[in-house]
Amino acid sequence: MAQLPPGIRFIVSFSRDQWYRAFVFILTFLLYASFHLSRKPISIVKGELHKYCTASNEAEVRLNGQSQKTGDTPAHQLPDNGTNCGWAPFDQDNYQQLLGALDYAFLCAYAVGMYLSGIIGERLPVRYYLTCGMLASGAFTALFGFGYFYSIHSFGFYVVTQIINGLVQTTGWPSVVTCLSNWFGKGRRGLIMGVWNSHTSVGNILGSLIAGYWVSTCWGLSFIVPGAVVAAMGLVCFLFLIEHPRDIACSSSLAVHPKGYENGTHRFRLQKQILTEENKPLDPETQCLLLSDGKRSGHQNHVVVLPDGGSGVAAISFMGALKIPGVVEFSLCLLFAKLVSYTFLFWLPLYITNVDHLDVKKAGELSTLFDVGGIFGGILAGVISDRLEKRASTCGLMLLLAAPTLYVFSAVSRIGLEATIVMLLLSGALVSGPYALITTAVSADLGTHKSLKGNSHALATVTAIIDGTGSVGAALGPLLAGLISPSGWHNVFSMLMLADACALLFLVRLIHKELCCPGSATGDQIPFKEH
């Protein structure tokens, strides 16, 4: 018999469960990356909505004066869809407040909607809920761009579009976190979710590049193309997303089988239901703990019995989720951590344009380095927290280092482009690390806390509470930046450093508890049932 080709040997080296798990990992990664891809264009387009046009205005005055002297019509006329200073109404002196209001409209709606989204998401099929949200988000992202083609200069139009888009985008985060947590157990959750959470940075990078490609020529496409991408991914979600491993008889945790069972021919066969002594079939999660011949393993004292998550278990209430130890502290910490992160998300390109005197496209491309640093920061936070088994302490250490790093960034970014590049990478890692860890691994830990006694209906609500509270900070950060920046960018950085200090302050009790009582800050994922 001929030897199997290397590619086939690689395929059969993984079990059926592992292939499905990898598929869900990649799919949810791409789904939420598309959400962030659609949020980034507004920060890139800001430099085009308002331009520094003193020189062009003076030239226009001189040109008009000469035309009037000769009695001819002016040779230079403003286009019907804008002015030399940008796009009305953002061409006025209060443009920073108007742009800040756009950010605030989106993020405030997102924060309010997030509290409701988790509660609704617990009671609806994740696939349908997420699909509807992505289709709606794609439509309203594109609608903002249509303002360019239809010469819409009403500030109210752009605000309302941002508000509705913020509301529908709240369907994303609780859905994807719930789905991923269903497929992956607590072991190595920090590393797995740290890698997975890089979708935020990947989406931001792609959004910056796509928006930057059209920003100087046709900024409407900077919104329409990302909107089309989100809508297309919504259709992919409807066709392929598998909410729970039990839907296709897979296990929800990494199972280790005997060598005799792990051969190439048996891996892709559907497991037959294993019967207990009472001839009752076990659910797929319990089957993964038994041997392939249907016999129980010799170690009977630590078998984890998971609930089937059926309709018999009531979804947790909002107040019940708040009573889970650690939810309030991590939520308030995320409020300030996300304030810092989203201020960079929405204002960094404009800051680079002002300080380094780059054009809008180059500033957008340079700002992606902050997200590149965020990828490494999220993974690093996950690895450290898994190794130490201390989520709060890991976040606290990175927040402690982030504040002085931001101070150095504000000081050296005016020196030259090389210094700006280095500090963008470092700041991105330290700012995004705690944010990524809290919104993924910490939320999943708390959503499966031992006090819930295996209630699988709590995860989306807990995730929504934590991210919803963080989104309050995400709404305040860009708004405050818009109000403070006219007095100087150094004041904006002072606000960001203060926010980092506040985030660290809310973790002090949990850090102390982790150091004194290891493993107690977020608790065990699922209680053991003795047999």
Image (spheres, rainbow, N blue to C red):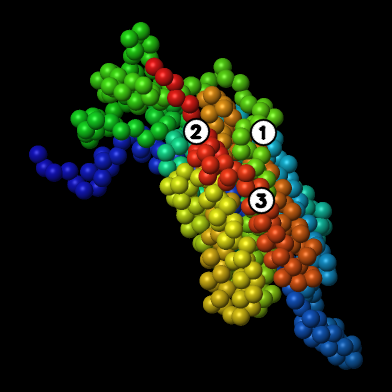
**Which label was assigned to residue 471?**
none
Write the residue at 56% across / 76% down: 419
Amino acid type, mark 3: Leu
Dot 1 lies on which element? Answer: helix
Labels 3 and 2: the sequence-earlier one: 3
Q: Secondary structure at mark 2?
A: loop
**Could you tell me if residue 226 is visible in this image?**
no
Instruction: Work out whether 285 lies above or below 511.
Output: above
What crowding class fits label 2: few (fewer than 14 Cα within 10 Å), some (14-19), or many (20 or more)?
Answer: some
> Residue 524: which disc?
2
Residue that badge 1 annotates = 322
For residue 473, side relative to residue 415 (left or right): right
C-alpha gap between disc 1 and disc 2: 17 Å
User: In this view, which residue lies farthest toward the top?
Assistant: 278
* Quadrant assignment, res 93: bottom right
- Alpha-carbon distance for marks 1 and 3? 19 Å
**What percent of the width, then of the height, locates residue 56?**
77, 82
Q: Judge depth for marks 3 and 2 and give the one in front.
A: 3
